[in-house]
């Protein structure tokens, strides 16, 4: 199982590749390579690896690594299941935070290694933990993509985060996102990482939602205390608490003024259209300068193509709400 980890220096089974799928190399290690999306099952991967005398083959991404490890564990008789996390955090510096810098109206990652995946997959395997005691037996988290785990699921549930691997998994399901400008904390988002965590139902063709088995409901005080306990376990500062103190004198934040209404799915080829609600709760006319940038992105949130980029100015009278219908000048074409 260890050799399934794609670490440097380990002769793993399959190489990772996250660049543009239209540019996937046709060969790797002298063998014909496959784009990660074209594999039809772990058996094909393991068979190709075996027939080529243990030569690492190409290529995989998180769901491929998870599928291969899952097949291996089940073949060994270890109960296991795949885990998929929507909006999964990646914070490799153990601070449970994904940091962005605001530059000229755009957000840039402070560290390219730390990011938000649109989704990420790993494996849970049921094991005893003779090294930790029966309290931590049962489901263990194992991520072959980043060679993390196994760590006890109970440790995450109880917010007992005392190792690098536990910090990795906790950030994956409950990291905060912080926006900085010239070293000053501007804003922090606490409820958008790990929005849905699912595993397949073995008896029906549907998923089982298991988010609450990792953390309390987002937006609750219980969830914030859960995060605070994890941060303190690692000896790091919980930025949301610091920000709350620094901003206690501010009456209105940006989200109190501007709201982008929920957008329905847009078919390929149709015009992107959405409504922005702007309100002015003050006693004076306010001028809002809105910068709108829409990109198509890959599942690691790396920008694929610019769809539209514009700036508009709006004057809102005192104690008035306004709705503005904005349509993209460019229709959505084929998004990679």
Image (spheres, grey):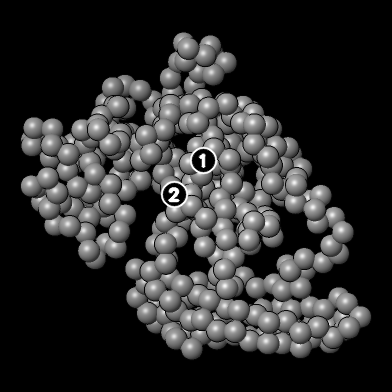
Image: 206 above or below 185: above
Q: Which of marks 2 and 1 is nearer the N terminus?
A: 1
Q: At x 61% / y 31%, what residue is drawn?
A: 234
Give residue 141's position: percent from left, percent from top. 46, 31
Proximity of marks 2 and 1: CB atoms separated by less than 8 Å? yes
Do we see residue 19 in this rendering? Answer: yes
235 left or right, relative to 295: right
Do we see residue 208 in this rendering? Answer: no
- The numbered mark at residue 93 is 1
255 left or right, relative to 129: right
Q: At x 45% / y 45%, what residue is drawn?
A: 84
Image: 129 above or below 232: above
Q: At x 59% / y 73%, what residue is drawn?
A: 105
Query: Quarter-wise, where is residue 274 in the image?
Result: bottom right
The C terminus, quarter of image:
bottom left
Image: 123 above or below 218: above
The N terminus, quarter of image:
top left
């Amino acid at each position: 199982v260890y050799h399934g980890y794609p670490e440097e220096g380990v002769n793993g089974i399959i190489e990772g590749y996250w660049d543009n799928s239209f540019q996937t190399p046709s060969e790797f290690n002298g063998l014909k390579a496959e784009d990660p999306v074209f594999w039809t099952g772990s058996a094909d991967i393991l068979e190709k690896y075996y027939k080529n005398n243990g030569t690492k083959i190409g290529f995989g991404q998180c769901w491929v690594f998870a599928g291969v490890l899952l097949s291996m564990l089940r073949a060994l008789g270890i109960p296991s299941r795949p885990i998929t996390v929507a909006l999964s955090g990646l914070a490799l510096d153990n601070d449970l935070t994904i940091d962005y810098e605001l530059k000229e109206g755009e957000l840039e990652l402070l560290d390219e290694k730390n990011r938000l995946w649109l989704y990420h997959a790993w494996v849970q395997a049921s094991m005893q933990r003779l090294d930790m005691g029966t309290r931590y037996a049962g489901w263990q988290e194992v991520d072959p993509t980043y060679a993390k785990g196994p760590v006890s699921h109970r440790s995450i549930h109880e917010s007992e985060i005392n190792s690098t691997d536990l910090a990795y998994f906790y950030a994956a399901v409950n990291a905060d996102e912080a926006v900085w400008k010239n070293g000053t904390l501007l804003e922090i988002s606490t409820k958008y990482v790990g929005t849905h965590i699912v595993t397949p139902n073995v008896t029906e063709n549907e998923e089982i939602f298991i988010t609450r088995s990792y953390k309390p409901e987002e937006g609750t005080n219980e969830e914030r205390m859960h995060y605070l306990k994890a941060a303190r376990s690692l000896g790091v500062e919980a930025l949301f608490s610091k920000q709350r103190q620094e901003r206690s004198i501010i009456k209105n934040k940006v989200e109190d003024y501007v709201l982008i209404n929920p957008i329905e799915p847009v078919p390929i080829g149709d015009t992107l259209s959405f409504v922005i609600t702007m309100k002015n709760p003050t006693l004076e006319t306010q001028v809002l300068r809105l910068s709108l940038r829409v990109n198509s992105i890959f599942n690691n949130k790396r920008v694929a193509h610019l769809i539209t980029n514009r700036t508009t100015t709006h004057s809102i009278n005192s104690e008035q709400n306004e709705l503005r219908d904005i349509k993209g000048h460019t229709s959505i074409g084929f998004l990679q």
